[in-house]
Image: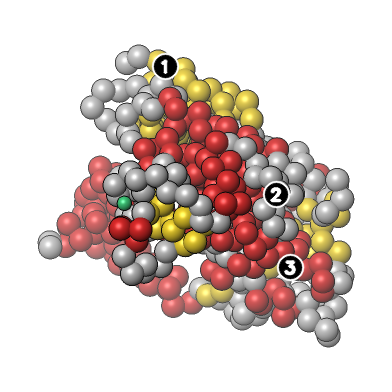
Amino acid sequence: MSAIEELVAEFARLPGIGRKTAQRLTFFLLKQPRETSARLARAVAALGERVRACSRCGNLTEADPCAICTDPRRDGAVVCVVEEASDVLAIERAGEYRGLYHVLGGRLSPLDGVGPDALNVPALLERLGPNGAVREVIVATNPSVEGEATAHYLERLLRPAGVSVTRLARGLPVGGELEYADSVTIAQALSARREMGER
Amino acid sequence: MPLIATPAIVLKVTPYSETSKIVRLLTRDHGLVSALARGARRPRSPTGAGLDLFASGVAAVRMKPQTDLQNLTGFDCTRAHANLAGDMARFGAAAALTELALKCAPAEPHPELFERLAEGLDALDRAGSDEADAAALSACWRFVGALGFEPALDACAVCGTPVAAPVTFSAVQGGALCKAHRGDGERHTKLGEADRDALRALLDGRWPDPPLDARHAASHRRLLMTFIRHHVAEDRPMPALVFWDRESWNATSS
Ligand SMILES: [Zn+2]
Ligand SMILES: [Zn+2]
């Protein structure tokens, strides 16, 4: 495979990039000074070398534990469970939340073969262990069928640990994604959160 | 490019680009359809509202000839089936039923299959916790039946000789077997009168009487799964079927 074909193939793997766009990106880089592609290559390599999942919360970070986990001003008694690290960014952007996070790395998705074993759940249970200071877990999975099912699964699992399990209030569009909700909506959904299992 | 409107059920939703989704639909009038829903990931998108797994409604699709990916221009959700996310056994069963449609339905329109899927999801969504197992099993068996694989219960699956209960049932061979075709019985299931009546009820879309307890529901699930593997799914992986069968949910859901 030629160098051009190889890069086109790599770009085409990225979400939302088809073969044509991949070719356009590749030919764009060919027309730029060599340093442009070198910088891109370095940035991509650094991503893989430096960024990893925080061993406590699963958030993406360069320092382990992450800056949120080690921030003394944050409330360690509240943990907000989200599907992806990008959801942490969305909630942080809303600027209201002062607790910690836990990133599942996905949601239950039977049709894609994603069961509970594929999610970062054991680490969450460990954080709620007998010496844990966690009082409340806010389940902030997406307001989709799979996100709701994941929330119910977590509620069943976490309830015996003696913590309060709450869910973001409705208001986020059904079938929607936290990542795309605006800050006001997220802040409202957080402040109006409700204990799960009560209808 | 003709714009069509058809009753449709959402079988799969995949994010595509920052703002769009690709959906797989089972439609009543056009069979399995893949469509791009532009802008559906935006929070206030009219197309995206309610466009979620298991939802049924009316889809507006711009059909292009000779392409696999159509354009979804609207989705008017009539039933979101929100209860299907309420417990794991129900969620797993709904996913298994959806997976049957996704992987085993023919591409051409098949209104009966569409009705079976719609009815099945509705019944599972509405069922009380004591009926959920029966609703799930019945929905899957009836879908399998509409695919053309109804198991033989009263006559031998091989030769058609009438058989009386208790019957020797072979999920592998497609149903009850007569004495001559029973062979040495690798992995056959004995179905007593009550078990056969229960299976017949499920195939007819009725809840068995007496209701299935957890142990019987599990046996029926096993039978259904073996049957699906051999007759319907063949070599296709069926992860949702495996998910549904996790002992942990089914043991605690009763
Ligand atoms: Zn962390
Ligand atoms: Zn026979």
Image coordinates of residue B199 in percent, x first then y, are 55, 47
For the C terminus of chain B, give its image quadrant.
Answer: bottom right
In the image, B39 versus B204, the foreground residue is: B204
**Measured Cα–Cα span from mark 1 to mark 3:** 45 Å
Secondary structure of the residue carrying tag 3 is helix
For the N terminus of chain B, give its image quadrant.
Answer: top left
Q: Nearer the viewer, mark 2 or mark 3?
A: 2
Q: Is residue B239 left or right of residue A59?
A: left
Q: Is residue A94 left or right of residue B135?
A: right
Task: Identify the mark at residue A157; answer none if there is no mark.
Answer: 3
Q: Amino acid at mark 1?
A: Ile
Q: Identify the chain of the residue marked 1, using the numbered disc in the image.
A: B
Question: Most extreme residue toward the bottom, as rendered?
Answer: A131
Q: Amino acid at mark 2?
A: Pro
**Residue at numbered disc 1:** B4
**Measured Cα–Cα span from mark 2 to mark 1:** 43 Å
In the image, B63 versus A60, the foreground residue is: B63
Q: Amino acid at mark 3?
A: Leu
* Placement of B184 over or under B1, stated as above or below: below
Question: Most extreme residue toward the top, as rendered?
Answer: B2
Is residue B131 at least partly visible in the picture?
Answer: yes
The residue under the point 20% across, 61% down is A6
Q: Identify the chain of the residue marked 2, using the numbered disc in the image.
A: B
**Residue at numbered disc 2:** B211
Q: Nearer the viewer, mark 2 or mark 1?
A: 2
In the image, A104 versus B207, the foreground residue is: B207
